[in-house]
Image: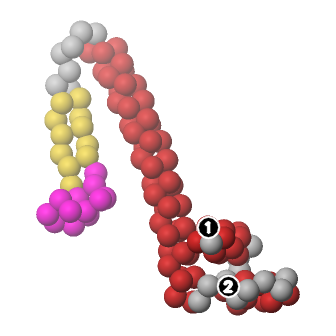
Amino acid sequence: MKKTYARSVLAMRYIDQGLPSLETFCSLMCLPNPVCQKAYDQINAKIADKAYDKINAKIADVSEALANASMKKAAVEEKIIDATVNSVVLSGDGTWKICGHTSLIGVCTLIGA
């Protein structure tokens, strides 16, 4: 029965409707009353969390691939410019959005010489 409730809430999300629309649909189809507002909100939050987690995982994968490709390209360019093998010297600095390194937003800069 819980899967039915979750699927009905998900269906309403797909068509940009909420609990009142679900209640109307159930009454027109002669179905029992759907979930109460509290249960609807809990199911909706679970669906949103799962979607958010999937999106974050995809963003992390793409960001990592892009960073690796960029670093490989920079290493190749540095070897071409310097014309020596494995003699790259780096200087780096980083910062965070807020103090204490608890922020998830940070910037790092590396300069090759």
Residue 13 in view in this figure: no
Identify which residue is drawn at 59% across, 72% down.
Answer: 2
- If you read the primary sequence from the N terminus, does the residue marked by circle 1 or circle 2 appear first? 1
Specify the quadrant of the image occupied by residue 47. Answer: bottom right
Circle 2 is placed at which residue position? 34
Q: Secondary structure at mark 2?
A: loop
In the rendered image, which quarter contains the N terminus?
bottom right
The kind of residue on which mark 1 rests is Lys
Residue 26 position within the rendered picture, expressed as x and y whole percent measured from the top left: 78, 84
Q: Which residue is mark 1?
A: 3
- Element type at mark 1: helix
Q: Is residue 58 above or below residue 111?
A: below
Which labelled disc corresponds to residue 35? none
Does residue 71 lie above or below 55 as drawn? above
Whole-percent x, y for residue 100 in the image: 14, 63
Does residue 101 show up? yes
Colour convention? secondary structure
Callout 2 amino acid: Pro
Q: Confirm or deny contact between disc 1 and disc 2 (CB under 8 A).
A: no
Which image quadrant: the C terminus? top left
Main SS of the magenta part reads loop
Residue stretch in magenta: 96-107
Residue 5 coordinates in the image, percent (x, y): 63, 74
Please tell me whether residue 53 belongs to the stretch shown in magenta.
no
- The x and y percentages for residue 63 are 43, 43
Q: Nearer the viewer, residue 55 or 64?
A: 55
